[in-house]
Each structure stands twice: as C-alpha cells, then as structure tokens.
Amino acid sequence: LFEPDEELYHLCTVESGGYTVEAYADHPVETAFTPIYLDVRETESNDVVEDADITILPVMDMGEHEHAAPVWQPEPVRDEDTNLFETAIIPNMPGGDMGGWSLEWQLNGQDHSTDKACEFDVADAPNVQVFTGDDDERYILTWIEPEQPKTGSNELKLALHHRESMMSFPPVQDLDIEIKPWMGSMDHGSEGNEHPEPVGDGFYEGVVNFNMSGDWQVYVTLKEGEAELYEAKYELVVE
C-alpha cells in the first residue's frame, strides 16, 4: 500500500462523500508559490483513487468577506514520481489576526467544501507582491526562483496573475517583464541577465546574474508595450 513521503508537511485530512483527502506541502505554507500534493482514497476501504477530476480553491476568511488566491488545478491522474495528485497555490497574504485560510475542493463534480474545511496556517514571506498597476488592474507578482540566489548566473522564475474578482485570479501572459539587479552598497548592477519571457500558465522564465555575494535588489518592471505599469523590488541575500 502506497504511503506518502514522510518528508512532506501534512496540511489536513478531510472526509466527505465516501472519500478521504490528505493534503500535503513541501513545508509549512508561506505567502509564496506553494506546491500542494493530494492523496485521495475511498474512506471505507482505504483504496487509492488513481484518477479523479479534482478542483481546489484556496480561500481566506477575513470575517466580513472572503477572497481566493492564484491556483493551478491538479492533473486528473497521479504524478508518476510522487504518486500523488499535484497542484499549486499562491496565498497572497498571511493568516493569523487577518483571517484564516482553507482549501475548498470538489471531487468528480461534487462539492465537498461545506462538510469539513481543510484549514491551514500561512506565514508571511517576501515572495509575493500585490499592487495596482498604472492600468488600474490589481496584480499578484510572485518570485519563485532562485530560492537561494548564488553568485553567478541563476535561473529566474516568476508568476504573474491579476485579480478578476475576489474569487478569481487568472494568469497574465500578455505583458512584458524587465529586470534590473542592483547592488546598492557597491553602486553597480550586473551583466548577463535575460528578461523573463512568458512560458505558459502565468509563469515567466529568464536569467538573473549576480557578480558578487552580498545584499542585492532586483527591480522587476511590468510593462505593456513601452508603457511602464509598475516597478516591484525584491531584496535578496546572495551567497
């Protein structure tokens, strides 16, 4: 009988409609790009469900209102390596006093969210920036890689979404992103950078180069043609 990797962080266990869902992450959840792994079984027999139509939605209850966050939906079959249904979310604000996060879910078209919530904590991290661009659109920009930047060339991966409504955050693929690494203490930037290009599903990939260790800033500019919509700044410590 398959057992999930013991190194995964357990988020919750929910039972509904004859199914048991175990949700896992790589580590405690932060305001960052967060892979989610789901193990679905039949509750009575504990038989593994090999394929299923699963839909999830991360929701933050702030008391007076709720809002969702960017999400990628699971493939209908288990991943060959992990043997789990894989997906990802980007919680766009921390929990705690502001409110609580939960994972709503549907299985094969049946909504199971009202039976028992999959609740989890979200800690604050600097990866996600939420802002309004000069086009009056609300955006969510997420730094994904490098997680631990090192001296030299680093693969760069970002995600970009916009707020269509409080419960819908579709990916953005039709804007340009430019980067500028800067080391303020030494008053210089770096060469060998490649502006991130869209690669699908809201992801942008490029190259960021740091020519020495220390404290760096990476300025990320969102553009529509020649018009600048917003400039975000990420503070990094380069080894």
Image (spheres, rainbow, N blue to C red):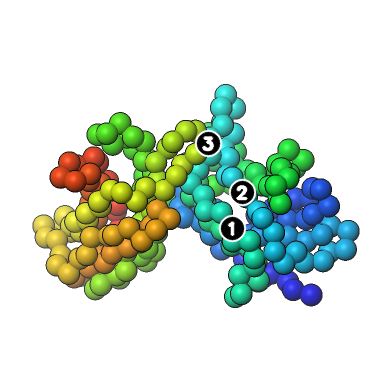
Q: In this view, does 216 lie to the left or right of 38?
A: left
Residue 85 percent location from the top left of the image = 63, 63
Q: In which quarter of the image is residue 79?
A: bottom right
What residue is shown with label 1? 74
Is disc 2 in contact with disc 1, using a CB cutoff of under 8 Å?
yes
What residue is shown with label 3? 167
Q: How crowded is mark 3: few (under 14 residues within 10 Å), some or many (20 or more)?
A: some
What residue is shown with label 2? 56
Q: In which quarter of the image is the C terminus?
A: bottom left
Residue lying at 39% horizontally and 58% vertically, measured from the top left: 200
Please report whichever mark, 2 or 1, sits nearer to the chain's N-terminal start: 2
Q: Is residue 220 left or right of residue 54?
A: left
Residue lying at 62% horizontally and 50% vertically, measured from the top left: 55
Spatial separation of the CA atoms under disc 3 and disc 2: 12 Å
Residue 133 percent location from the top left of the image = 28, 36
Q: How crowded is mark 2: few (under 14 residues within 10 Å), some or many (20 or more)?
A: some
Spatial separation of the CA atoms under disc 2 and disc 1: 8 Å
Camera-side residue: 18 or 191? 18
Q: Quadrant of residue 153?
A: bottom left
- Residue 124 in sight from this viewpoint: no
Camera-side residue: 8 or 41? 41
Please report whichever mark, 3 or 1, sits nearer to the chain's N-terminal start: 1
Residue lying at 65% horizontally and 44% vertically, measured from the top left: 104
Which residue is at the far right? 44
Camera-side residue: 27 or 70? 70
Three-letter amino acid code at the position of disc 2: Ile
Three-letter amino acid code at the position of disc 1: Pro
Residue 233 percent location from the top left of the image = 26, 48
Question: Vertical placement of 157 versus 229: above or below?
Answer: below
